[in-house]
Amino acid sequence: MRKPELLAPAGNLEKLKFALIYGADAVYLAGKAYGLRAAAGNFTLEEMEEGVKFAHDRGKKVYVTLNIIPHNSDLKGLDRYIKDIDRIGVDSVIVADPAIITLVQENAPNLPIALSTQANNTNWKSAIFWHNVGVSRIILARELSLKEIKTIVDKTPSTLEIETFVHGAMCISYSGRCLLSNYMANRDSNRGACAQPCRWKYRVVEEKRPGEYYPIYEDERGTHIFNSKDLCMIEHIPELVDAGISSFKIEGRMKSLYYVATIVATYRKALDLYLKDPENFKTDPKWLDEITKASHREYTKGFYFSRPGQEEQVYKTSTYIRNYDFIGIVLDYDESTQIATIEQRNRMIIGDDIEIMGPYRDYYNYKIEKMWDIEGNPIESAPHPQQIIKMKIDKPISPFDILRKEVPIE
């Protein structure tokens, strides 16, 4: 049985570290240009070099996106950039356009190339075509069923890796090839500047009745007609492995480090348990509960088992469901004094019931009883963004552990 790679998003250097520590085998990221998430933090070359070293020191990999659909002006300087990231030692680049494939082969001939989902690969014959021109991995279009994916795996050479998305936001357009953002906001989604107009709320105006706005009803529940549910395949690990997928990809370079850590840790646990004992594997309902503690929309299985219908859209709202607040990161822990040093990320107060999660272990509940500021003065609350505080915690914890608390339902 091939062990699939667990691939996580890294919107910045901090998220990269959390993704790898919480169980990702590899991360994908972008520099300050040429990627499709221009609004993410992204990486300078110096940050990228630090991230690659952090990953390689742990036996893990870093992939860099060059997946814009380039115009002539976008090609300027790309040859130099490819040489720079090759020198840094990235493990692969993700591309969507033949021009960029050619530039990579000319400027970094030993750098592996993965074909982006933006290239819309949906069949085994085109997968072989791309492999023959030098692509070593295909990130399949999201509009494929498990049966179709398995056929592609079976009919392509073993030297070609197949990667698919298993979790995260779904694009209303075919594998992300969207012009709606260009039309509505003059921002090119295929060059990294998507304004996400698919999440906006729309009404209709009849041309002879200006100012009279009529709601668009796809059904009785609302008007967000382009607003897809999020993909979630945590309950179908055996089927994904059986299909022969080489890499399980999590979407979310714009999401928080708490999101990345939570989703990665849960898929890591599920995948490892299946690989350890496939015959006796059972999906644990707690995994889905854990995943819903990160910001999310309602979930869907996407195209994996059937063609999505009207139930795969969220009609009421485009906002995320947030049941938990990410409130802090453990920076240090002194076992002799049981004092933790914590960087605050959201307000916390004495008496809060919190959960403390860490990589490769279950979370546990804790009640905040004592806190001090950095000078050692007792405090009742930690209200300031990224405030450094001390906290008494009588259970062993470690740097990179995360503190969260449940948000009361109004």
Image: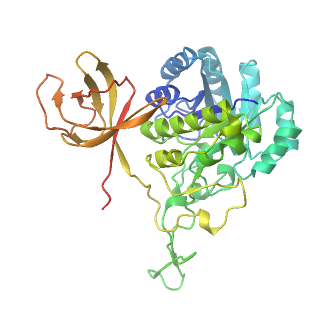
**What's the colour scheme?**
rainbow
Q: In which quarter of the image is the N terminus?
A: top right
The residue most toward the left is 377
Q: State the residue at coordinates (44%, 36%).
A: 257
Q: Please state which of residues 291 and 66 is positioned toward the viewer in this rendering.
A: 291
Q: State the residue at coordinates (80%, 50%).
A: 147
Q: State the residue at coordinates (56%, 50%).
A: 169
Q: Is residue 42 above or below residue 240?
A: above
Q: Could you say where residue 318 lies in the image, as x and y percent from the top left?
A: 47, 60
The residue most toward the front is 280
Q: Please state which of residues 224 and 249 is positioned toward the viewer in this rendering.
A: 249
The residue most toward the bottom is 208
Q: In which quarter of the image is the C terminus?
A: bottom left
**Can residue 122 be seen?**
no
* Residue 153: quarter of image: top right
**Can residue 194 be seen?**
yes
Q: State the residue at coordinates (58%, 16%).
A: 56
How many labels sit on residues?
0
Is residue 387 left or right of 264 when viewed as pictured? left
Q: Is residue 226 above or below residue 253?
A: below
Q: Could you say where residue 332 lies in the image, as x and y percent from the top left?
A: 31, 20
Q: Please state which of residues 381 and 367 is positioned toward the viewer in this rendering.
A: 367
Q: Could you say where residue 362 lies in the image, as x and y percent from the top left?
A: 44, 35
Is residue 238 left or right of 167 when viewed as pictured? right
